[in-house]
Image (cartoon, rainbow, N blue to C red):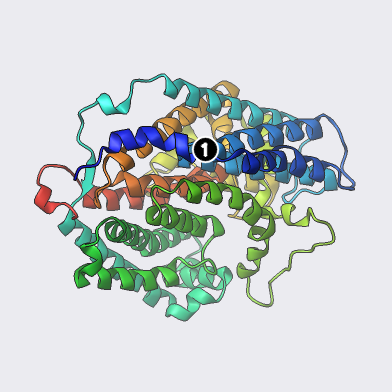
Amino acid sequence: MTVDFAARARRVPDRAVLSRPLSVPLIAGIVCVLPLAVAAQSGEGVRDTTFSLQLVVAGYAGIRLCAMVLSGRRRLIQGAFWLFSYLAMGIAPLAQSVLGRDPTPVLGPRGDTQLATALVLCGMFAFDLGALLARHRPSLRSRSRPPAAVHRQRLYILVAIAYVASAMLILQLGGPQVFFASRQEISASLNEATGTATAGDTTGGEAGNALLRGFGTVPAMLALLFLTRWMVTSPRARRRPSVLLPWAGLLVINAIVNNPISNPRYWFLTVLFALLFTVFPRSPVMYRAALALGVIFALLVFPFTDRFRYDENGRQEVETQSLLEPLVVKDYDQVNMFANTITYEADGNGHTYGQQVTGAVLFFVPRGLWEGKPQDTGFLVGGWMGTNSANLSSPLWAELWLDFGAPGMLAGFLAVGYLAARTDRKYVQRTLDDPSPGNVLAVVVPVLAGYSFILLRGSLLQASGRIGIALLCLALVTTLRGDPRAQLR
């Protein structure tokens, strides 16, 4: 019996559309009720032009997020973009304006925040325009390029690397118990393992920490995802001890090295997002639930998980005198840091004309060989602000604007929107046309969608290390479809 997956792909949008009784309250809640409820709260903020622009940003991002949820096609990367934009660039800054409180100090005048908000809105328009242009490109089905697949023997090599790298990380930090203490204790253990505490070179120490942690977490995640994909799509694999036993071990390893207690929350969100869509690769219900429930999770749960960052002595509980308090935390400082970046440039520092993006792309070049290697953008602006914190965000809007100005930022978001739409389109077509266990795209796109939260939050230099390690892992396991006997079955 044969299945026409192409015909099935054409039928998915018709039966995946959300029913009207469910779509109406969804649109009303996200686009109108939540932004207006935030705006109606009492606070010390000024209801000025910036406040009005933030209300427009929240409304527009909410409309586009609803369009992603209601769409018959699963647009993972675009959906992640609009979920982040709605919460971090829309609702959270709106709440901060209402309360008159900033999670990160804004040093410049209110006009810089107004400009940052306007540029955020323009970047969203450019992203949408790029996605619209991608719709008019020829169908990806007409191209005869063979899709990439997972090579069975190479996958087992990746599994072995994951076991060794994660074991090294666990042993270097003093055992599994450290991963269930706090992020503060993990950072201290990393500094001790890489010699940062005594070397005095904080920049090099941070790079060593990122390298050690990246190799201890990324291969384990990707190996688990590929084995999960194999088991989900192949009944034969679910009966093989050679698949089941490594998968069970990787599940335990990921529970240790990628748990939400000792890891940045955006990274754990990446792992969770990727695993969810690897287990449910074709479910439109799961796709819609992930985006819709993501709003609730970010508002009600995400800010309170900050308690895992510190030990008992340094832990600060989130105050809840107001319903908006969870949105006035450091996780939502993206617009604040964009405004500070604008002030930083106007203070005589100027644009960097591609240096920051180049530093992120060439992250693997040691500073000993590249004396003028750019610093992390968040750290650079933070140093100008008078803080030595390495945990300041630098959203993609700020990264592109600092490098290329407003025209370059708009061109960058135009390209990002175009590539996101093309990748989403290819993902839908390839996962339906090619339901094989070794379909690389079926794993890569969910990972990229989850990791886009980190890329959008920034900074790019902090995010680039794990991307490089992931690309090495993908290059190891990927092959073109030449020998079917070497593919996963």
Kindly identify the residue that appears in the image at 76 percent across and 37 percent down: 108
Q: Which quadrant holds residue 480?
A: top left
In the rendered image, residue 443, in percent from the top left (x then y), is placed at 34, 50
Compared with 101, 407 (above or below) is: above
* Left or right of 457 in this view: 223: left
Q: Nearer the viewer, residue 344 or 245?
A: 245
In the rendered image, residue 256, in percent from the top left (x then y), is placed at 43, 72
Res. 191 visible in picture: yes
Compared with 290, 214 (above or below) is: below
In the rendered image, residue 137, in percent from the top left (x then y), is placed at 38, 20
Res. 341 visible in picture: no
Q: Secondary structure at mark 1?
A: loop
Kindly identify the residue that appears in the image at 83 percent across and 57 percent down: 322
Q: Which quadrant holds residue 83?
A: top right
Q: Which residue is mark 1?
A: 17
Q: Nearer the viewer, residue 242 or 16?
A: 16
* Left or right of 417 in this view: 239: left
Q: Quadrant of the N terminus?
A: top left
Instruction: Give, as a three-letter code, the residue at label 1.
Output: Val
* Left or right of 424 in this view: 25: right
| Classed neighbour count for the residue bearing mark 1: other residues with Cα under 10 Å, few (<14), some (14–19), many (≥20) | some
Q: Quadrant of the C terminus?
A: bottom left
Picture mark count: 1
Q: Nearer the viewer, residue 143 or 340?
A: 143
Kindly identify the residue that appears in the image at 31 percent across and 56 percent down: 229
Kindly identify the residue that appears in the image at 44 percent across and 40 percent down: 359
In the rendered image, residue 196, in percent from the top left (x then y), is placed at 48, 66
Residue at the far front in the pictured view? 1
